[in-house]
Image (tube, rainbow, N blue to C red):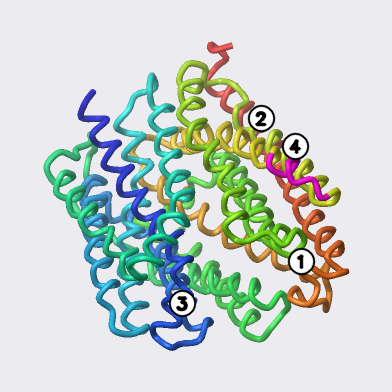
Amino acid sequence: MNGRYVALAIVMVGVFMSVLDAVALNIALPAITSDFGVAVADAQWVVTAYLLTQTCFLIIAGKVSERTGQARMFTAGLAAFTVASLLCALSANLEQLVLFRVVQGIGASMLFSVSTSIVFRSFDVRDRGRAMGFLGSTVAVGGMLGPVIGGFLVGTVGWQSIFLINVPIGAVAAIVAVKVLRIDEILVDRLHMDYRGAVLWVVSMASLMLTLGWVGQSGAVTPEIVIGLAAFVAAIVLFVRQERKVQHPLMDISVFGVKRFTLVGASMVMFFLSFSMVTILGPFYYEGVLNYEATIVGLIFMVLPAVTMFGSPLVGRMYDARRFRPYASAGHIVRAGGFFIMAYGFLTVNVLLTVAAFFLMGVGSCLFQTPNNSEMMLALPREKSGLASSIQATTRNLSMAMGISTATILMTLMMGSMDYGAIAGGPLADELARSVAIAVSFGGVLSIVGAAISRSSEERVLKEEGNEDR
């Protein structure tokens, strides 16, 4: 039993370190821009390169783990992430920093491709939900403390410290992982890598992520968006054809024929799409309509991860005791209520109501994430847990990117030619409030769709596995 919790602790450290680094770096971008004397658009590649690389290599890392083992893959990823963090801190120019962020992204893909699977395989049905809940809390804590720690480190030591803090933590965790991280798994005798499929997958994911980023920046159809979309469609069509004809595919696309797996994944897409309606557009309301300082906005936004931090392990215990309950669909419904309440609070300038909405969204997130993540792993055979884990992480990244683009497009359509800087805090601030409220309401609609998808999945689970828990 102790070995399982040691494994959980190691995974939690790796996940916390990568989440904290990703969130805190947003605070450091202005300092990096000034230090290297570059344009903001160029400095943004420090963030883009990391997310792009991580998303592209999640599936590939999951495939390689079939030969190396998930424990070794995680340990190697932890080591790569730590070494890359040191190199990032020592970067002499922006080009070096972006290059080492690519290496860091590869390390993160190795971590996240197997992290959920390691926890899933280390625990049995009696306490798996609680363990998954602790993992979810780790992400929430990292997201909550990232801006605070990042702001303190950048303001007192410098932006390099955001990377340097990873070095001792990652080094200790990697050493411990080498010695004690073991899970029960059967490895393949030989790695059958579909290199052509891997290239097509990287091209498809890179073109999609870049296109979503361009859509978010411009909010309109541009030549690069058309080219990027065309490249994605062509690459993904060729990828699917490639995977269907090879004996050892990079991704076994037959798993998407498992309706339970596909439904749970679709529900996750709705969750993260709707999430972006608040995380991206909410600050525009608080700063543009209410003239709040960024620090106050940060404190308001901490309500949601704070609830998730304490609530996820609790829901995990509930899930362990009573698995066959509509947790995910209920989570979507609670979140939908939070979205609609927040939209009303935005329109009526009721700050307390918006804070209460954040609390509701946190409760809904707790109800959704741990059970949904667990069911996605359970939908496939145990030997495909690595594939399920890497697809889950890829789905999360892509959904968040799509959510950012969707939120930006909605704001562009509703505000038209009005400039945010010109209307923020002025007589047209009410128009900004209305636009954000409509976009947040759309998040509620997405949550209702997600609830319907989750309910369909839950009913299928009951049908396939019985209703003995009722």
Give the Cα distance between marks 2 and 3: 38 Å
Q: How far across and down, in percent of the image, does residue 326 sit?
A: 62, 25
Give the Cα distance between marks 1 and 2: 29 Å
Q: Point out which mark residue 411 bears.
A: 1
Which residue does the image show at 62% across and 46% down from the upper left? 271
Is any part of residue 247 visible from this angle? Answer: no
Residues at discs 4 and 3 in contact (Cβ within 8 Å): no
Quadrant assignment for the C terminus: top right
Please name the residue that numbered disc 2 is placed on.
Answer: 330
Secondary structure at badge 1 equals: helix
Pick whichever, 363 or 55, lies toward us: 363
Give the Cα distance between marks 4 and 2: 11 Å
Which residue does the image show at 49% across and 67% down from the upper left? 205
Q: Which amino acid type corresponds to the residue marked 1 in the rendered image?
A: Met
* Highlighted range, magenta: 349-355
- Horizontal side, residue 445 vs residue 361: left or right: right
> Is 307 drawn above or below residue 168 in the view shown?
above
Assess whether residue 328 is covered by the magenta stretch: no
Q: Which amino acid type corresponds to the residue marked 4 in the rendered image?
A: Gly
Q: Point out which mark residue 45 bears.
A: 3
